[in-house]
Amino acid sequence: MAFLIDGKKISSEIKEELREKVARMKAEGIEITLAVIQVGQDPASSVYVGNKKKACEYVGIRSLSYGLEENVTQEELLSLIDELNGREDVNGILVQLPLPAHISEESVLERISPLKDVDAFHPVNVGALCIGKPGFVSCTPAGVIELLKRSGIEIEGKECVVVGRSNIVGKPMALLLLRENGTVTIAHSRTRNLQEVTKRADILVVAVGKPKMITREYVKEGAVVIDVGIHRTPGSKKLYGDVDFEDVEPVCSAITPVPGGVGPMTIAMLMHNCVESVELQKRQVV
Ligand code: NDP
């Protein structure tokens, strides 16, 4: 039976460590503030925003909420970001995605000061990761690295295959595995003989956005399998990943479940970035 990598437990440990650190910072007179902007009232976004606010409360981070109407103009949203960029009492700015079609996500994300970009989507932070400079690291891939490290899984020297090359997950994931001295391959929709590529992996990270696509035919015996995917069946509360868990679990050495694997790590790493922001802002390094 494969070792179950417990994202719920590890994310709780991280939040607990952060809570203690934030309490120590408060005692020194340092308060951390995250500004969360939501445009419209998409139910899924409201759940994500609610969970982020709850996590802030638990860790001891002050959160400011900005709920904007669905028909807000891009200029209005950008001027709110400018205002928050200029406020000394705001450490992190987060704009919940997706945005309505009339607003350019790229323009909005690039307007956030790289020093307050706790989601790490700004090109300056992506570039910093690429060349090994200090900066914010995208939360979900950073969470995967924490899962591996805290489960005692060594990355150095391992064959790592990332399936998916999105800017939010796949690419930063590959860069982080490289930073940890893994030998990294990125696979995507144009990869030929995908099974041959994924079967080379000692560590296989799957972020394809296709429910249960990865079956045991894609997995080397004894590999570690990390499933980033999240899919909800319409009309049901059940969640699925990109990996067919029941099929793959018997052949791998360790695996993340869905739910309870990578999912809870994203918010824990967002909290980590909020705490980190104080140091980055002090040193003005991004
Ligand atoms: P995207 O749709 O942006 O990217 C999917 C990637 O998978 C693309 O690079 C695409 O290739 C590749 N791909 C698609 N089909 C295939 C295929 N048949 N074979 C090989 N590669 C394929 O998704 P995201 O990266 O945003 O998200 C991936 C998954 O992770 C989703 O299920 C999402 O819900 C989940 N997610 C979970 C998070 C969490 O907190 N746990 C956070 C963010 C995402 P190409 O580039 O060629 O099109």
Image: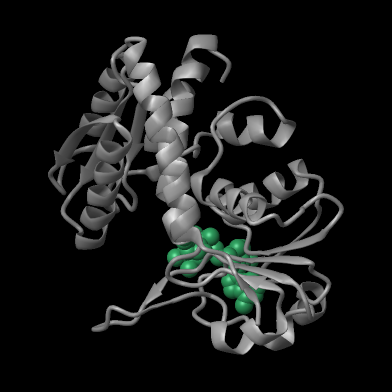
Left or right of 207 on screen, residue 63: left
Quarter of the image that includes the C terminus: top right
Q: Quadrant of ligand 1?
A: bottom right
Instruction: State which quadrant residue 202 falls in.
Output: bottom right
* Near-viewer residue (236 or 128): 236
Q: Is residue 118 visible?
A: no
Expressed as whole percent of the image width and height from the top left, the position of residue 124 reads 57, 28
Q: Position of residue 170 (x, y in %)?
A: 61, 56
Q: Is 273 situated above or below 191? A: above
Name above or below for residue 64 compared with residue 208.
Answer: above
State left or right for residue 17 relative to residue 245.
Answer: left
Q: Position of residue 108 (x, y in %)?
A: 37, 36
Along the line of sight, which residue is nearer the eye, 114 or 255?
Answer: 255
Q: Is residue 216 left or right of residue 43?
A: right
Outermost right residue: 157
Q: Residue 30: percent from the left, percent from the top? A: 34, 14
Residue at 44 percent across and 59 percent down: it is: 8
Q: How is the model colour-coded? A: one colour
Q: Is residue 246 in sight in this rendering?
A: yes
Depth check: give the residue in front, 234 or 104.
234
Say which residue appears at 46% left-offset and 51% top-offset: 11
| Residue shown at 23% from the left, 44% from the top | 38
Tally of marks: 0
Q: Which quarter of the rendering shows the N terminus? A: bottom right
